[in-house]
Image (spheres, rainbow, N blue to C red):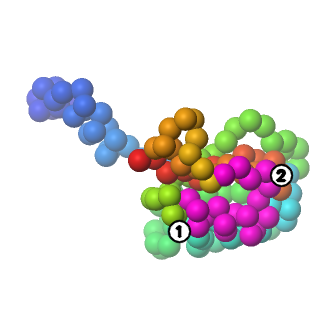
């Protein structure tokens, strides 16, 4: 740690960590049947900025538009034994309008058990839509003010 970092206040150190650390490199979501869930992700992930695909018949990865494969990606991995559980993946939107737009994309692509979009948790600052893919994997698109 440098002298400057050692003298930094706690909020400054948190901000430094936030800018130096990537939230995730990739996500590998297990699905029991790729064909069953594919329509939702083929519609939703490109609408969220992940239009590039790499697939091998059992798995598919959705990459950012950039040609740089070191960028974060979202993968669907076939596991016939997979059973959905209580885990939820939440994607962050840039606005309420973006949540609304992506909720419509998900709805049109076959999302199930859709709740919202609306304010949640008693807060006008947390706006989200919750839904599931055809395998029962839980997803969310949210915006925080």
> Does label 1 or label 2 sit earlier along the sequence?
1
Rendering coords of residue 52 (x, y %): 59, 73
Residue in the picture at 57% in, 35% down = 121
Q: Is residue 72 left or right of residue 109?
A: left
Residue 122 sits above or below residue 69 on the image? above
Q: In front: 132, or 67? A: 132
In depth, the one of 137 and 99 nearer the eye is 99
Residue at x 46% of width, y 68% of height: 68
Q: Quadrant of residue 16?
A: top left
Q: Which residue is mark 1?
A: 49
Q: Which residue is mark 2?
A: 135
Task: Answer above or below: position of 85 versus 96.
Answer: above
Can residue 47 be spotted in the picture? yes
Q: Is residue 23 visible?
A: no
Would you place residue 81 above or below residue 95 in this image? above
> Magenta residues?
99-116
Q: x and y percent of residue 9 in the render?
A: 18, 27
Q: CA distance from mark 1 to mark 2?
A: 23 Å
- Residue 12 placement (x, y as % from top left): 22, 34
Residue at 50% of width from left, 38% of height from top? Answer: 123
Q: Nearer the viewer, residue 38 or 4?
A: 38
Under circle 2, the secondary element is loop
Q: Can residue 111 be found in the magenta stretch?
A: yes
Instruction: Give percent across and percent down for residue 49.
Output: 53, 68
Q: Is residue 36 left or right of residue 44?
A: right
Q: Which residue is drawn at the image coordinates 66% and 66% (left, top)? A: 104
Image quadrant holding the N terminus, namely top left
Q: Residues within 10 Å of mark 2 (few under 14, many from 20)?
A: some
Q: Please rate how many residues cluster around mark 1, counting C-alpha atoms within 10 Å: few if below 14, some from 14 to 19, many from 20.
A: few
């Amino acid at each position: 740690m440098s002298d400057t970092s050692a003298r930094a206040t706690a909020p400054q150190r948190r901000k430094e960590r936030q800018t130096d650390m990537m939230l995730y490199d990739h996500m590998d979501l297990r699905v029991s049947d790729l064909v069953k869930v594919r329509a939702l992700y083929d519609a939703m992930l490109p609408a969220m900025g992940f239009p590039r695909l790499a697939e091998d018949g059992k798995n598919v990865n959705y990459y950012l538009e950039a040609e740089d494969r070191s960028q974060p990606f979202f993968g669907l991995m076939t596991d016939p034994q997979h059973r959905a559980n209580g885990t939820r993946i939440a994607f962050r939107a840039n606005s309420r309008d973006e949540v609304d737009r992506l909720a419509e994309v998900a709805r049109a692509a076959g999302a199930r058990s859709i709740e919202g979009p609306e304010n949640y948790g008693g807060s006008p600052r947390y706006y989200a839509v919750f839904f599931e893919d055809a395998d029962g994997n839980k997803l969310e698109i949210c915006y925080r003010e």
